[in-house]
């Protein structure tokens, strides 16, 4: 960020607006205060202190009219005491617009840190500035500084001799400043218990104590510790590596994590804990270090990466912890040894600042730490461990959040390595996780209502690390009304208290209702047409939404077929998911919820289409695949295999498939599989026979002995209603036999035997065969009494004469005549 020839240049602070305050000494030993504006990328001189003193804390107000700084006497021999007699530290407040008066706020023997508050008010400068003073004597004060303007833009401190102050906190042993959110966290000891408290400062210059929560951390003998009150890289590295580390991290989703690493007596084992306060539990990790022959002088660094928290020990390990979904260890990434992601980070002690900023304590350089999509994709492709594949997949999808290019890269890898994972279904996990991220940002609490992973349990150990999970106390909130982050945190805490079982959506109700509808269809007893029409209308909306999202022409013949069963499943899922959201998303407009549901289900289907099209393109298949004119090639078998894996992935979760999927799957199965394997797949439910696929098969294949056997085997496995239609398309004695049997079965269902004349008019029959003649006469009488024929597809009808002809042909075949 900064380029300067002075070796003495040091970064002192990063303010809320991103501006960086630094100091250096000129040739005469004067202390120069500078500011780097991150917006204009320009440096600005703030103030020059014409004495050889060391600055360890500094802050400037948002209008850049006041500068607060704490200085200590130079330790060089021969230098006299430049400060006030008897004082070790001097805290100054300087008017710098223009440079004018200097006021001494503190002249004491203990260190004082300074920090201006930055309210979110950009339209006009506030008449009062607020300055925090943090003392080594374990108290925090807030100074209220009134300023006035004279002679144009000249800014002066009003009543500088009597600045009002408030005591914010006292008797604390640890404190942290959150610059971006203007929060003060501190810990005090009550009966040897560590109590974490938080004060929120507001734009209207008020503040509130927000919560208290006990922590199981040992701070009684740790001394005094401050975090993020400026950049402190003057610490002794030996002490840094053995000192405890404690940080509080939050993000916009309402998470609250406390990361803690106790004092380290030995480097053979490292222990650190993360208190997921918003989840009501903590996790303590223990790892053994490799190559500890050389003395370790680098301490653990905790980094806030929004949805993740990183634990980093330079040269040894990097642990990326999922903050929003910490329950399963496989959703977090643990890397050790020589790894590209570890090597990109500085191998020096690091100080984590607000946001994702870190300070390299060796060079004084500031970095912004971001997760690398390319590194995560490379890890996903190269690692052999399922747990690392799982974590890398989720982290990469978080970084991309619906980016078509990133999804395309992941899908390309999946299509080439569909069997790469043994502990979980790779396609299933990708579909669920990517669909989750597609609607995650739409509204809060979505993470509680939709599954982010298909994996519910993980019992496999992660190499190199052990884990202990414990329940912890929830915070006691000290205010009654919440806004913004605090509303989300309170919602998370309420969820932990009362959400048993969890609210994650599943398709159990959809599965039951779908089976009921299919059963009703088979028996011909379907409920009201309005209900079914509404479900099918939902499916039409999903498909329309899907086609609107992707205007490019599709290579595969999907979404072009009615496929009523998949449309019923699609529509039922829309209805059930919408009801699920309406129950739990209070205050969200119904129209927005409906669109979220359509987007989510459309994304599920789009991902399936994308996976199939990627495989189709990779194997260079063409539309000629859709005809039964040759045996399947290796490329067709590869696509058939990935379609089978897609079917397996969606079947256990009962997710809908794009209409036309089963038809294409069946066509490829007929072409690629031997008959006995094909029939086994049909009988076991791997292949679902659709009317479109079977019609095409009947028309495309001729009546060779092999094809006759295939057609007959398939017709026998069709549902009765579809089977009757298909038989009319096959001009074959076997088809006539089946049609006749079905016709006779229907006629005789309610037949009651009546006394009959034993004399039969033989002249009306083409063949004199008494049993057949008698049977045909009975059928003719029934048809006459019913005064109806039983129509099939087309204009032809089946009657007793058709049955007689079919029976004779069948007998002739059996006798070999």
Image: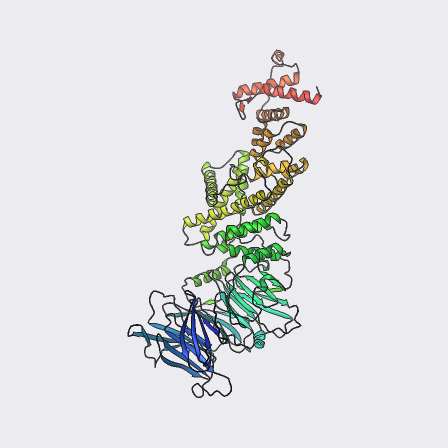
**Which residue is at the far top?**
763
Foreground of the two, 405 or 792:
405
661 on left or right of 152? right
Q: Number of labelled discs?
A: 0
> In the picture shown, does residue 810 fall above or below 561?
above
Q: Is residue 644 visible?
A: yes
Look at the image and tell me in which quarter the C terminus lies: top right
Residue 210: name its quadrant. bottom left
280 on left or right of 105? right
Foreground of the two, 615 or 662:
615
- What is the x, y in percent for residue 319? 58, 64
> In the picture shown, does residue 660 fall above or below 224?
above
> In the picture shown, does residue 448 fall above or below 188?
above
> In the picture shown, does residue 650 fall above or below 187?
above
- What is the x, y in percent for residue 379? 60, 57
610 on left or right of 41? right
Q: Is residue 457 visible?
A: no
Residue 645: name its quadrant. top right
- What is the x, y in percent for residue 458? 61, 57
Foreground of the two, 507 or 186:
186
Q: How is the image coloured?
A: rainbow
Residue at point 29%, 72% (across, down): 152
**Which residue is at the far left?**
151
- What is the x, y in percent for residue 236? 55, 77
**Which residue is at the far right?**
816
């Amino acid at each position: 960020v900064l380029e300067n020839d002075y070796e003495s240049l040091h970064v002192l602070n990063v303010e809320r607006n991103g501006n960086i305050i630094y100091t250096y000494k000129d040739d005469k030993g004067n202390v120069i205060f500078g500011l780097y504006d991150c917006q204009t990328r320009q440096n600005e001189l703030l103030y020059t202190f014409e004495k050889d003193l060391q600055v360890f804390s500094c802050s400037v107000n948002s209008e850049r009219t006041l500068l607060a700084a704490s200085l200590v006497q130079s330790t060089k021999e021969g230098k006299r005491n430049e400060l006030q007699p008897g004082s070790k530290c001097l805290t100054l407040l300087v008017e710098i617009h223009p440079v004018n008066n200097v006021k001494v706020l503190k002249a004491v023997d203990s260190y004082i840190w300074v920090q201006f508050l930055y309210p979110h008010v950009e339209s006009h400068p506030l008449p009062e500035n607020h300055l925090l003073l943090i003392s080594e004597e374990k108290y925090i004060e807030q100074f209220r500084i009134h300023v006035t303007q004279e002679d144009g833009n000249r800014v002066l401190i009003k009543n500088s001799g009597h600045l009002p102050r408030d005591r914010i906190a006292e008797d604390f042993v640890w404190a942290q400043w959150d610059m971006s959110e203007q929060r003060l966290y501190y810990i005090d000891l009550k009966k040897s218990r560590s109590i974490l408290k938080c004060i929120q400062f507001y734009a209207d210059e008020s503040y509130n104590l927000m919560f208290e929560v006990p922590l199981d951390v040992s701070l009684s003998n740790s001394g005094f510790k401050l975090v993020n009150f400026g950049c402190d890289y003057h610490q002794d590295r030996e002490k840094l590596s053995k000192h405890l580390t404690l940080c509080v991290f939050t993000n916009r989703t309402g998470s609250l994590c406390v990361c803690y690493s106790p004092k380290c007596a030995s480097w053979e084992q490292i222990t650190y804990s993360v208190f997921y306060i918003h989840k009501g539990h903590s996790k303590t990790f223990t790892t053994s270090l490799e190559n500890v022959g050389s003395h370790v002088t680098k301490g653990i660094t905790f980094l806030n990466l929004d949805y993740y928290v990183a634990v980093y020990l330079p040269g040894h390990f990097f642990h990326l912890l999922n903050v929003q979904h910490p329950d399963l260890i496989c959703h977090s990434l643990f890397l050790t040894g020589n790894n590209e992601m570890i090597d990109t980070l500085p191998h020096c002690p690091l100080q984590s600042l607000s946001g994702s900023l870190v300070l390299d304590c060796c060079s004084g350089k500031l970095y912004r730490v971001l997760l690398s999509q390319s590194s995560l994709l490379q890890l996903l492709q190269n690692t052999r461990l399922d747990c690392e594949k799982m974590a890398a997949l989720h982290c990469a999808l978080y970084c991309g959040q619906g980016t078509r290019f990133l999804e395309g890269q992941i899908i390309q890898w999946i299509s080439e390595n569909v069997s790469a994972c043994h502990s979980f279904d790779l396609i299933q996990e990708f579909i669920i996780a990517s669909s989750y991220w597609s609607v995650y940002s739409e509204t809060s609490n979505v993470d509680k209502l939709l599954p982010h992973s298909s994996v519910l349990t993980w019992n496999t150990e992660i190499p190199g690390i052990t884990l202990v999970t414990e329940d912890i106390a929830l915070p006691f909130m000290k205010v009654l009304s919440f806004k913004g982050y605090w509303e989300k945190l309170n919602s998370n805490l309420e969820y932990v208290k009362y959400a048993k079982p969890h609210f994650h959506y599943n398709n159990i109700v959809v599965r039951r209702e779908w089976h009921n509808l299919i059963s009703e269809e088979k028996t011909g007893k379907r409920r009201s047409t309005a209900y079914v029409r509404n479900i099918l209308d939902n499916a039409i909306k999903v498909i329309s939404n899907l086609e609107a999202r992707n205007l490019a022409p599709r290579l595969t013949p999907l979404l072009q077929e009615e496929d009523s069963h998949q449309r019923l499943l699609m529509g039922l899922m829309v209805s059930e998911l919408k009801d699920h959201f309406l129950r739990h998303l209070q205050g969200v407009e119904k129209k927005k919820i409906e669109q979220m549901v359509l987007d989510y289900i459309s994304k599920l289907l789009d991902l399936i289409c994308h996976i199939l099209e990627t495989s189709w393109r990779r194997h260079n298949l063409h539309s000629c695949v859709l005809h039964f004119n040759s045996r399947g090639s290796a490329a067709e078998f590869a696509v058939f295999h990935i379609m089978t894996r897609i079917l397996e992935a969606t079947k256990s979760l009962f997710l809908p498939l794009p209409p036309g999927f089963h038809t294409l799957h069946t066509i490829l199965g007929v072409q690629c599989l031997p008959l006995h394997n094909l029939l086994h797949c049909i009988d076991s439910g791997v292949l679902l026979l659709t009317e479109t696929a079977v019609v095409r098969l009947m028309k495309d294949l001729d009546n060779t002995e092999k094809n006759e056997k295939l057609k007959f085997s398939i017709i026998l496995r069709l549902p009765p209603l579809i089977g009757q239609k298909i038989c009319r398309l096959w001009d074959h004695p076997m088809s006539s036999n089946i049609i006749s049997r079905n016709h006779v079965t229907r006629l005789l269902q309610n037949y009651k035997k009546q006394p009959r004349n034993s004399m039969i008019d033989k002249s009306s029959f083409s063949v004199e065969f008494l049993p057949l003649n008698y049977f045909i006469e009975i059928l003719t009488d029934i048809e006459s009494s019913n005064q109806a024929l039983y129509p099939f597809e087309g204009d032809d009808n089946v009657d007793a004469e058709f049955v007689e002809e079919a029976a004779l042909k069948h007998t002739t075949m059996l006798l070999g005549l």
